[in-house]
Image (spheres, rainbow, N blue to C red):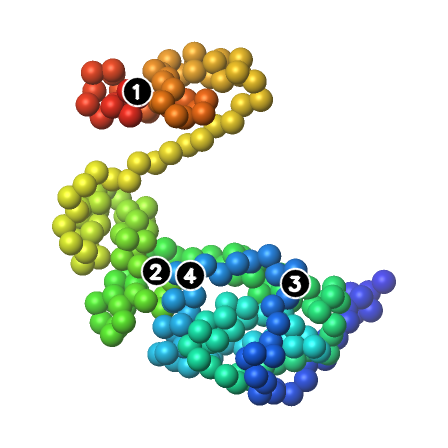
Amino acid sequence: MSDEAQTKTVVLLPDEVVAVADLKPHPRNYQKHPEDEIEHLRESLREYGMFRNIVVARDNTILAGHGVTQAAALEGVTEITVKRVDLDPSDPDAIKLVVLDNEIGHLAERDDRLLTELLRYVNEEASAGLLGTGFDEMMLANLLMVTRPTHEIADHAEAAAWVGMPEWTGEAPRVELRLYFDTEEQRNELVEQLSVNIARPSGSNGVMVAWWPPRGRDDARNVMFEG
């Protein structure tokens, strides 16, 4: 069977203005929109208005634009322009739209170094700073650390200064790696191979911890092992 014969054309109806209260989230939408994301979306609505397409099925079930719709409702928007497809929300092509809206962006290739330059400019010049971009200053500083060699950005203090944050006064955030084993023997075998000091903090419910590179028991930073 040819590709042409396998392809079904989805009918896109003319744009409509509908009440936000009449729009329904898709029951199978698996992507949630936490409060910090919604706040960025709300700021984008305040600055630019509704420029993203909301796509709905025949019965006003949202197929694309769940987060924007949620943000619009919180901003007091009562009516919204939607694109309607002539599909039931349970139709495989409708569900495909849900996944497309959530996932297709991960296929893009991003120049993170260029992104840090753009975000720095926005942070310095835009009235609301980074709010509305999906980033905040700490996220930008962390991105900067992984996109610059040490001769450009040596540590978090320099990253904070580059972003325009207050001077960094603390240690870098601790990076953690959690390992899970089927048996205690497997865990002990790895511990022996690594030759690290393993401790079980009080109240850890069986969780054991260690520092890497190994820290001696007299290291003041090793106090987490006590108790």
Q: Earlier in the sequence, mark 1 or mark 3?
A: 3
Q: Nearer the viewer, residue 60 or 168?
A: 60
Residue indicated by mark 2? 135
Q: Nearer the viewer, residue 123 or 112?
A: 123
Which type of secondary structure does the marked residue at label 3 adopt? loop
Q: Earlier in the sequence, mark 4 or mark 2?
A: 4
Distance between mark 4 and mark 2 Cα atoms: 13 Å
Which type of secondary structure does the marked residue at label 4 adopt? helix
Distance between mark 2 and mark 1 Cα atoms: 39 Å
Residue 170: x and y in percent read 18, 41
Q: Earlier in the sequence, mark 3 or mark 4?
A: 3
Q: Earlier in the sequence, mark 4 or mark 1?
A: 4
| Residue count near mark 4 (Cα–Cα under 10 Å), binned few <14, some 14–19, many ≥20 | few
Residue 9: x and y in percent read 75, 75
Residue indicated by mark 4? 35
Residue 102: x and y in percent read 56, 61
Seen from this angle, which residue lies furthest right? 1
Residue indicated by mark 3? 27
Image height of 206 relative to 130, above or below: above
Quadrant in the picture for residue 42: bottom left
